[in-house]
Each structure stands twice: as structure tokens, then as C-alpha cells.
Amino acid sequence: MDAPWPTLTVLRVEGISFAVLALLYATVGARTREAGLRTLAVAFTLIAAWYLHADLLVFTGPLIDTLQLRLSAMLIGTAVLAIVAGMLQYLGMPAGWHRAATLAALVPGAMLVLALTVSARVPRVVFQAGVLLAYAGPAVLAFRRAAQQPGEGHAILGAGLVMLPLLPFSLRAAGVAPMQLQYFAGLSVLVFGMAVLAISLLRRHAALAAEIERRAAAQAQLREANARLEDRVAQRTAHLRELIEGLEAFTRGVSHDLRGPLGGMSKLARMATDALAEGDMVMAQRALPLIAEQCDASARMVAAMLDLARLGDANVRRVPVSLGELARAAYDEVMLSLPGVVRPSFHRAPMPAVLGDPDLLRAVFVNLVSNAVKFTRGAAAPRIDIEATSHARDVTVCVSDNGVGFDAATAAQLFEPFYRAHDGRYEGYGLGLSIVRRAVQAMGGTVSAHAGHGGGARLCFTLPGALREMNAGAAVYEEPEVLPAERAGSIGTANSLVYPPPEEMQVLRELARRGNMRSVRERADHLKRLDPRYAAFAARLATLADGCQSRAITALVEGQAQ
């Protein structure tokens, strides 16, 4: 007959439960590789083996004196020490004197287990107290971790580790029979083991959720970075396209605008050579000034192209700038470079102080005012108006005139290099407004053009975030200024400048006649150092030299003699 199945007692049910718990720990530990779980799996395996054979134990008295009892005590003692070791790994071994105290709590239990291996007779109560004392180390460590890392379940583990050694003695003091303590002790260890496993899984779940959130945030940042990169690539592509278009326009403009002056100079030079060979000094003297004018025109065009090219590499500054002073200085500079031209009246509305690059803003105002002066020459009462408005901290400046105007359909083309709105009927090379656009874009702004009804033009530029405010948050505005035609016509006369001595003026006149702009600029720097009173004259002289304005320099020098 088949052997009967063993009776399923309470102790064996607890043993099976510990075996299942040990299997869970081994599986989770192998999967997550979390510290301490595999050591706890070994501990619960030992406890399962003890409970599966606990019904066979025969207790003879208060001493552990038989081989069966010694083996049983060694098994359960080793299991308790393994639980303590696993919890120390799980919580993280402390440092310093905490480590020494924790290890010291393990010594009594380890000594008692070793004593049983040499057939020593150990009182059962002493053995239980010595082995259970090992729980003190991980219990204190669990409460320390609870203070350091709240919300991680360490306080529950600390309470469980305190309960495990106290429960047997508490039940014994309450009158529970010694043979029944193993039932309650096994149940408490089982509950503690399930709690540790549940907390471990919850911590793992929280860590995975945090990792998912971190990766989602990283992916969002990566998408944002990719979007920014695509925007930068699009901007760079647009900039490169603009550069290529500019180079193509540059090539066309240079080939067209230099071909005429160079061809004229070549013909005039041959005529002068032939005239000198024939002894016709009158013809040679007529041809040479024309050659000089053609050279000046070519030099001015090259200077304008160089100004446009330099703006692409400009280091933009952001300093307080007076728009009103810049506008007035630009008007004076343009008027000085155009002697004999009918000067339009100048009307400037109140303008705010801004944060911007003074050099770039000067180039903007000079070219806008020069453009307005050029196209108002045919007006009965030429007039230039400059005004500024602000919205939030953005500042928009507009230069208006009552000149010939332009076709509104060509507004977008006005700022293209070498574009001429009136088919060459006015002097220039189509670069002034290109310089305006490049300078404004370098400061992060935009430009626009608006045709007036019945003539006139309104050219504007906007500087984002440029409004300068005082501490109270109010913008700083300058007083308006009006220069009537009579006042405008007196700009550049002897009353407004202190001129250097006649010998210096003679040198400047000769240099201007030769077209030696480099030497003129050097003489301007020399005059500025020579006497501070000549600073204004030297500044205007340097401006004209930079623009290769030899005729304007001659007019400035001869104006003193007049």
C-alpha cells in the first residue's frame, strides 16, 4: 500500500508559506538585483526547512542538550542571523561607530550558534535572547533611514524588526505556553517577510515611475533641442541663401557700376595721353578732373560695398544711446557732404532713449536721412520728419519725406542690394537701404517701407526690447527739435566750426584734389590731437574721408576761405 500523506499541521502550513516566500524573494532578487533580497531568500529557506520538521522535535527541558535540539537551534539561529545580514544589505551598512555597534549585536547570536556545534548545553532562554538581540542593529538602522529618507517605508521595517525579538517574550509573559510560541513567532516572521517584499516592490515601482518621468522629460528636452536646432538650421539656411543672393547681386552690381566709371576713365586717360603727345595742355587739363571724379565715384561705391560687408561681422553692443542726438548728427553729416544742395527742413519729434549699438544706429540714420535728402530735391518745400513710437519695450523709428516716393508694390525690394527704385535717374548705387537693413537685423530688428499718398516715403525700423527705462519704469524722452530751411542751410559754415591754420587747410585741399583719403584721415587725427578746439572739424573731416567725399572735403576746406 502507498504510504499515507503526512498530516498537514499548522507548523507545516507555515513551512510551506515560508518556502513560497523564499521562492518569491529569490525570483525578485534575481530580477531586480536589489541588495539583500537573495540573502533573505536563503534565510526564509532555512526557516521553511525548520517549520516543515518542527513537529518531530521533542523538548526535554529548559536546556538545548540533545543532538536533535542542537541541530534545530543551529538551523533557526542561522536563519535569524541571515535575516539580520540581509536587512543590513537591504538598508545599507552604516559607517563609523554605527557599523561597530551593529556588528557587536551579532556577536552573541553567532557565539551561541558556534557553541552548539561543540556539543555545549545552552539554556533555551539564553539562546533565544542572544540570537534575537541581533535584530537591534538593523532596527536602529531602519529608523535612521526613515529620518533620512521619509516616505520610503523604513519606519515600518524598523517597527517590524523591533517586534520580532519582543513578541516571544511578551507572549511568554502573558502566559502563552512555550510550545505555542513557535506558532506566533513563525506568523510574525512571515508577516515581516511579506512586508519587506511589498516595500521593495513599491520602491521599485516608484523608481521605475521616476525613471519613466525622467526619460519623458529628457525626450521632451531632446525634442525641444531638435526643434531649436531645426530653427537654427532654417535661420542659417535663410542667411546663407541671403548671402548667396547678395553675392550674386554684388557681382551684377560691380560688373554694371564699375564698368561705366572704369571705361570712362580709360577713354579719358587715352584722350589726355593723346593730348599731351600733341602738346594740347588745355584738353589734358579738362580730362584729368573728369578722371578724378570717376575715381571718386568708384571709390564711393567700393566704400559702400565695404560698409555693407562689414555689418555681417559686426560685434553688436547694447549701450544707452540718444536717438535724438544721432538723428541730428546724421542730418548734419549728410548736409555737410552735399555742399550746394537745397537743404530740407528737419523736424524731429520727441524720441526715447534706447539700448543699442551707436555705430550701427549711426549708419542707419545716415543712410535713411541721405535717402530722404536725395529724393526731396525736386520738392517745392523739402521736409524730413523723424519720429519714434514705443510698444511695451519695442521702439519703432520712422523717417518720412515729401519727395518723389515709390511704387508701393516695390516696398519689399527697396532694401535689396543694388536695387534702384527710379531706374538710375538719381545718383547712388542701391546700397544705402541695404546697409540699413543689415544693421537693423544685426541688432535683432526689422525694417519696413510705406509709400505716401501722392508722393513721399516713410521708412521705418523696429528694435525689439530696446526701450530704456528709469528706475520708476518710465521711458526717457528727449525734447523735439525743428530746423527750418534757413537754419539747415547754415550747417557747415565757419560759425559752427573752429578751423585749423591756413597752412593745414592748404595741405588738406591738396590731398582732397589728389583723392588721397587715407592721408586726409591721418590729418584729421593729427588735428584732433593738435588742439581740442579742432575736434568737431576733425570729426567731420574723418567722416567725409571714410566716404571718399573728395568734393565735399574741398567744399569744407574752401568754406573757411569764404
Image (tube, rainbow, N blue to C red):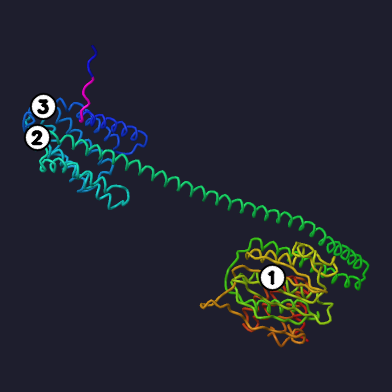
- Given residues 367 and 354, the one toward you in this image is 354
Disc 3, SS: loop
Q: Is residue 266 above or below residue 472?
A: above
Amino acid, disc 2 = Arg
Secondary structure type for disc 1: helix
| Residue type marked 1 | Val
Let me know if residue 460 is in the magenta part: no
Q: Main secondary structure of the magenta part?
A: loop
Alpha carbons under labels 1 and 2: distance apart: 100 Å
Q: Position of residue 92 (x, y in %)?
A: 28, 44
Disc 1 target residue: 364
Give the CA separation, mark 3 to mark 1: 107 Å
Magenta span of residues:
5-10
Residue 520 visible in the current orientation: no
Q: Amino acid at mark 3?
A: Val
- Using the rendered view, name the quadrant where residue 322 is placed: bottom right
Q: Residue at 82% of width from left, 62% of height from top? A: 257
Return the residue at label 3: 58
Find residue 286 and report its image quarter.
Answer: bottom right
